[in-house]
Amino acid sequence: MSDRNIDDLHPFVAEACRLTIADCQAKLGVTVIATSTRRVFEEQEALYAIGRTTHLDCKPVTESKPGHSWHEYALAWDFAPIIGGKAVYGDEKLIQAIAEIGVSHGLRWGGDAGFVTAGIVDGDHFQMTHGLTIEQALTLYQQGGIQAVWNAFEAATPAS
């Protein structure tokens, strides 16, 4: 089961997450929840296997191999708008409005032009990387764990 605890995100990402959720309620009148925050590598491996080596009757649920998801470094979160007590994923106008709010808080949206150009559209995803590449994050993690990734992330944080 994916971690949904916002406190498990890097504090900068957690703050942006909380601000996005609060602004969605205030500006759109929509409750937004975090559906996935930090993932351990084993969970990412299991998710990547779906539709490839396990659950062959399903479509793949992620394009990110283990070590190549920002969730593993607690720098990403997935969301769902809740309307009438149910998660709503097909309302593109609503997702776009949520995306604009998240971007205003320094997050990168999984449906922006860069993701689309790369052939990956992850419309319910936000991340904050401050210019780190996923390869850099993996190398740092292998050398010093999540704290090494977070230290590099913080060192790359733009001045406010």
Image (tube, helix red, strand yellow):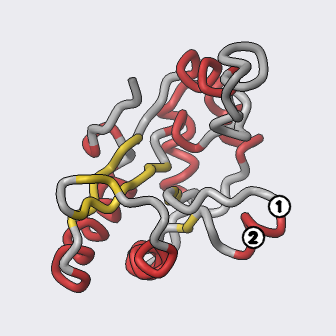
Give the quadrant of the C terminus. Answer: bottom left
Residue toward you, 94 or 125: 94
Quadrant showing the N terminus? top left
Q: Secondary structure at mark 1?
A: loop
Residue 56 in picture, x, y percent from top left: 73, 19
The residue that appears at 45% across and 71% down in the rendered structure is 91
- What residue is rendered at 57% in x and 48% in y? 152
User: Residue 40: x and y, percent?
Assistant: 50, 23
Q: What's under tag 2, amino acid-wise?
A: Gly
Amino acid tagged 1: Ala
Residue 29, percent across and down? 18, 79
Q: In the rendered image, which quarter is residue 94 located in? A: bottom left
Q: Give the residue drawn at x 57%, y 16%.
A: 42
Residue found farthest to the bottom? 27
- Confirm whether residue 68 shows in the render: yes
Residue 129 image position (x, y, % from top left): 58, 57
Q: Is residue 83 left or right of residue 136?
A: left
Give the vertical position of 32 relative to 98 (above or below).
Answer: above
Q: Which residue is mark 2?
A: 114
Q: Nearer the viewer, residue 84 or 153?
A: 84
Q: Marks 2 and 1, how far apart in space?
A: 6 Å
- Residue under label 1, please give it: 118
Is 147 left, or right, of 69 in this rendering?
A: left
**2 and 1 marks in contact (CB < 8 Å):** yes
User: Quick one: label 2, few (<14), some, or many (20+) residues within 10 Å?
Assistant: few
User: Measuring 44% from the left and 49% from the top, which residue is drawn there?
Assistant: 77
Is any atom of residue 143 visible in this view? no
Assign a secondary structure to mark 2: helix
